[in-house]
Amino acid sequence: MSVPVRRRTAAVVGGVAAALLLAACGSSSSSSGTSGSPAASNTDPACADYAAYGSHPGTTVSLFTSILPPEQQKYETAWKQFESCTGITVKYEGSNSFESQLPTRVAGGNAPDIALIPQPGLLAQMVKTGAVKAPPQAVSDNVDKYWNPQWKTYGTVNGTFYAAPNSANMKSFVWYSPSLFKAKGYTVPTTWDQLWTLSDKMAADGIKPWCGGVGSGTATGWLATDWLEETVLRQSGGDVYDKWISHDIKFDSPEITKAMDTLAGWMKNDKYVNAGIGNVASIATTTFQNGGKPILDSKCGMYQQASFYAAQWPSFKASVKIAADGDVFAFYLPSIDPSKKAVEGGGEFVAAFADRPEVQSFQTFLSSPLYADIKVKEGGWVSANNGVPLTDYTDDISKLSAQYLTDPNALFRFDASDLMPAAVGSGAEWTQLTAWFAENKPTKDVLDAIDAAWPSS
Amino acid sequence: MSVETGGLTAKLEEAVVAAPDHGGMSTALRRNLSSPWASALVIFITILWTIPTFGLLVTSLRPAADANSTGWWTAFTNPNFTLSNYSEVLNGGNTIPGGIAPYFINSFVISIPAALIPLTLALMAAYALAWVPFRYSTAVFLAIFALQVVPLQMALLPLLQMFNKGWTIGNIPIIPPIKDTPLHLLAASGGANFAPLWIAHTMFALPLAIFLLHNFISQLPKDLFEAARVDGASHFLIFRKLVLPLSVPAIASFAIFQFLWVWNDLLVGLTFAGGTADVAPITVYLSNIQGTYGAALHLTTAGAFIAILVPLAVFFALQRFFVRGLLAGSVKG
C-alpha cells in the first residue's frame, strides 16, 4: 500500500523546477534538461541521450502491469540508465490478476502512477472513471511520428489521446517446422490459395496439416477469437472489421457467418485437425501452450498463433532453434487480397494515473525510440515503433514480427475481442466459440448467442 | 468470510468426527468408526486426498522442461529429479527476481498481528457479551454473529477507499485516510504499510472470533464467577484471573485458525498490499512466479512447498489444542 505523503512532499519541494521541466518535456525533445536541478549525473556522457527527461532526484514512479518474471527483469534493465540519469526510481509491480486488480485499485483511490494496459477496452473503462491523465504533448508527438496511425486510435478514447503503445505482438503468424518442410519438399505459402493447396497436400501425405488448442484456464477460447478475426479481416477488410467491433455489423451477419464457414473448413475440418492430438473437439480441451507441441515431433504441419508463442518452445525442448533453418519458425498468414497486407496485432498501452513531472518524464521515455531500441536489443520483445531499426532485433522471430508491424502499408488492426465490450470480447465470444469446437454447436446458434450477450447500452 | 466460515465448519465436523475419545460422542458412532471397513475407507479417502499434494511435490522436484511437457506420474518410469527449482525459488535466478525470503518474512509480519489483534478484541467482547449483563446484549451478539454473512469480496472496495480516502458524511470526516493518522508512521521506506492488512484481516475475523469465544466463555461454570464476585473481584480481575486461564484451549485454536487463514490468504493481501517485496505476502509471490503465461509450474510448486512448511509446523506443534479447543467451544454441554 503506497502512502502518498512522501510523494506529495517531494512534489511540493520540486514544485518550481517541476513546472519548468514539464514545459521542457512538452516543447520538444530537442530542449535540453537544463531547467532541472544541476544534478551531477546529467554531466555523465552516458546521460546525454536522457537530458530531455530532466532530473527528478528522489522521486518514485509506480508501475503496474500484467507482465511477470522473467520478462520483468528485462524491463527493469531497459530503464536502468533512465533511472540513474533522472534520479527517478521505477517501482515495478506485476500481477496475473491485473485486469481485476486495476479497476479495484483505481476505484479504491490507490491507482498506480502508470499501468500497462493490454486491452483498449479496459483503457476506455478506466478513462470513464476520470482517473486517467492525458499524457504530455511529447508522447503524442512521438506516437504520431513513430507508429502506424492505426495504433494511436487504440490509445484514444472519445477523441482524446491517452495512451501510447508499449510492446506489440504479431498475431498473423503460422508456426511450422522448417525441417519437416524441407524433408517433404514443402514451400512456405505466400498466398491464401497456396496455403490451402499445401494443407491438402499434407493431408494427402498422411500428415494432418493443422493443430491447435484454445484452452487457457478461465480465458479458454481466446485463441479461437483470433482465428475468426484473422479470417474476417482477410475476407471482408478493415471497414467490416471496425463495424464488427462497434456492433454495427452483428455476429449473425453474412460477413461473419462467411468467416465462420471458412474457419469451419479450416480448424473444424476432420482432414486437417487436430494433428498429433486428437479429433476436432480436442481443440477445446488442449491448452494453447500445448497446441503447437506436435509440430516439434513432426506430427503436425502448422499452428496459427501469435509471435509470443516463441516463448513456449523452449519448455518443450530446451535447445530448440527458432529460425528459418531451425526446428520451428513462423510465416505470415497470407492475405486473400495480396495488395492489402492484413496484419492483426496486440499490445499494451501506457496509461498514466498521475501527472507529476517524474511520471510524465517516464511516460515520455516509454514512447521514445530510445527506450524501444534498448528493449528490442534485449531480445524477445517487439515494438511497432518504427524508430527502431530492424537490424537491432536480435532474434529472427521478433525481426519478422517487427517487419510486418512497422509496415506503413499494412492493413493493421488490433485484436477485435480486446476492443469489444468485456461481456463479449472476454466472455460470450470465448465460451461460444469453445462450445462450437467442443460440442459442435451449430454456427447460427453460436453467433446468435454472442449477439445476445452484447450489452444493450 | 464465507470461505473462512465454510472451511471452519468443515474442520469443526472433522474435529468432531476425529475425536473418538470425547465423552459427548455416542458409543454406537464410536463403534462404527472403529470397524475395519471404516478404517479402510478413511485410509482410502486419505490417500485420494493426498494424491494432488503428492503430485505437486513430485512436480517441484522435476526439471522445468519435464514438468512442463509431461505429467508428474511419468517421473516414476523415467526418473529425473533436481533440487534446482528450490534453489531458484530460495535465491532468485534467471527467471524470477529475488528469492522468496522477504515475502516469507512479510507473511509473518502480516499474520502474527492479524491473528493477535482480533483475538484480543474478540476475547474482551466475548467476555462482555457473556458475563456482563447489559440491555440488548443478546441483540448485539446476534448482530455481530449475523455479520458473518457479509462476503469478504463485497467489503474489499469500500475498505480500500476508506484506507486511501477516508470516510466522510457530508463534509464531516468520520474516519480519516490512513496517511493522516498515526498509522502512517508504520510505513516502510517505500511508503508501503502493513496497517491496512492488519485492520482488514481483523475486521473480517471478528464476527467468527467473537462467536466462537463467546460460546466457549459462556459455558464456563457460573459458580466460579459468582464466587469471584462475592469476593469483590472486578470485571477486569475476573477476565484476567479466571477467563483467560480457563479459555486457553479456545484461544489457542482460534489463534491457529486465524494465523493459517491469514497465511494462506491471497485476495486480501493482493488488494491491500499489492505485489511489491516491501509488503506482499508469500501467496502473492507464489502467484507471480508462475510467469506471464503461467508456464513456470516447476517454480510455483517448489515455492508452494516452502510456503507450506509454516502451516504444517504450526499444525503439528499445536495439534493438541486444535481438537480440544474446537470441541470445547462448539459442543454445547
Image (spheres, coloured by chain):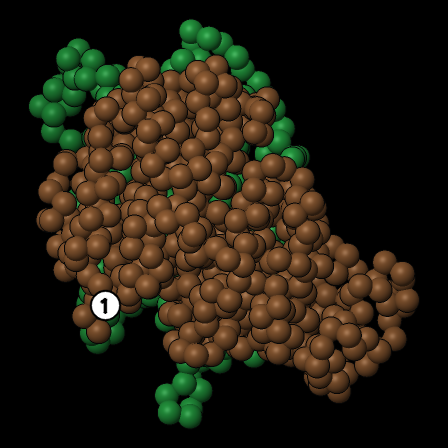
Q: Is residue A431 visible?
A: no
Q: Give the quadrant of the C terminus of chain B.
A: top left
Q: Position of residue B284 (x, y in %)?
A: 49, 47
Q: In the image, what residue type sits under mark 1?
A: Asp
Q: Is residue A184 visible?
A: yes
Task: State the residue position of label 1.
Answer: A248
Is A85 or A243 nearer to us in this picture? Answer: A243
Residue drawn at x 66%, y 59% is A387
Instruction: Characterize the local packing of mark 1: few (<14), some (14-19) or many (20 or more) Cα atoms within 10 angstroms.
Output: few
Question: In x, y percent, where is residue B315?
Answer: 42, 34
> Element type at marker 1?
loop
Q: Colour of chain B?
A: green
Question: Is residue B105 positioned above or below B235 on the image?
Answer: above
- State the image coordinates of residue A308 (x, y, percent, origin top left): 50, 41
- Which chain shows up in brown? A
Q: Residue at x 23, y 68 (%)?
A: A248
